[in-house]
Amino acid sequence: MACDRCKGDTCAPGAGLVLEPALRHLATDPDEHVRARAAELVGRFVHTDARAAAALERSHTQDPSPTVRKKAGWYAPGGTIHTRTRPRTRPRSRKHDAAPTLMP
């Protein structure tokens, strides 16, 4: 549903289409493989949707599967993938911090 690799030149569906079903699968699907894949999908929206962060944190601490707990932890706030994919703020330009140079 959201795999960019499979789509070629089309865009992956946005949060409005996929986040709600992914949250539901992450919380309630009986198959641990489905929950693990749902964690990946929910993780795509962790920086922009508080529901995604809360769901991943909950799965990281409460899921019965160690695999799902581990994967959810990667995407949850503070996890390795969360940290690596966090949006970067633009550094201030040093051009404006330098003292003006006078021309002779």
Image (cartoon, rainbow, N blue to C red):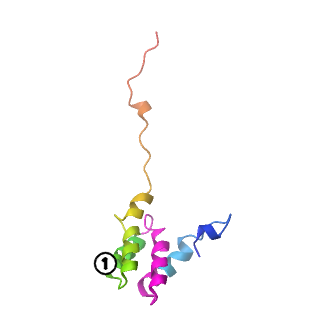
Residue drawn at 42 percent across, 58 percent down: 84
Q: Main secondary structure of the magenta part?
A: helix
Query: Which residues fall within the magenta stretch?
Result: 23-49
Q: Is residue 39 above or below residue 27?
A: above
Residue drawn at 38 percent across, 31 percent down: 97
Residue drawn at 36 percent across, 66 percent down: 77
Q: Decide: few, some or many residues near mark 1? Use Cα within 10 Å; few <14, some 14-19, many ≥20.
A: some
Q: Is residue 90 above or below residue 59?
A: above
Residue tagged by mark 1?
A: 61
Residue drawn at 46 percent across, 88 percent down: 31
Q: Is residue 18 above or below residue 95?
A: below
- The answer to whether residue 25 is magenta is yes
Q: Which residue is nearer to you in this view: 38 or 65? A: 65
Q: Which residue is nearer to you in this view: 51 or 22? A: 22
State the image quarter where residue 51 is shown.
Answer: bottom left
Q: Picture coordinates of residue 26 (x, y %)? A: 44, 81
User: Which quarter shows the N terminus?
Assistant: bottom right
Q: Picture coordinates of residue 100 (x, y %)? A: 41, 22
Q: Picture coordinates of residue 49 (x, y %)? A: 44, 68
Please state which amino acid type lies under the numbered disc 1: Thr
Q: Which residue is nearer to you in this view: 53 or 36? A: 36
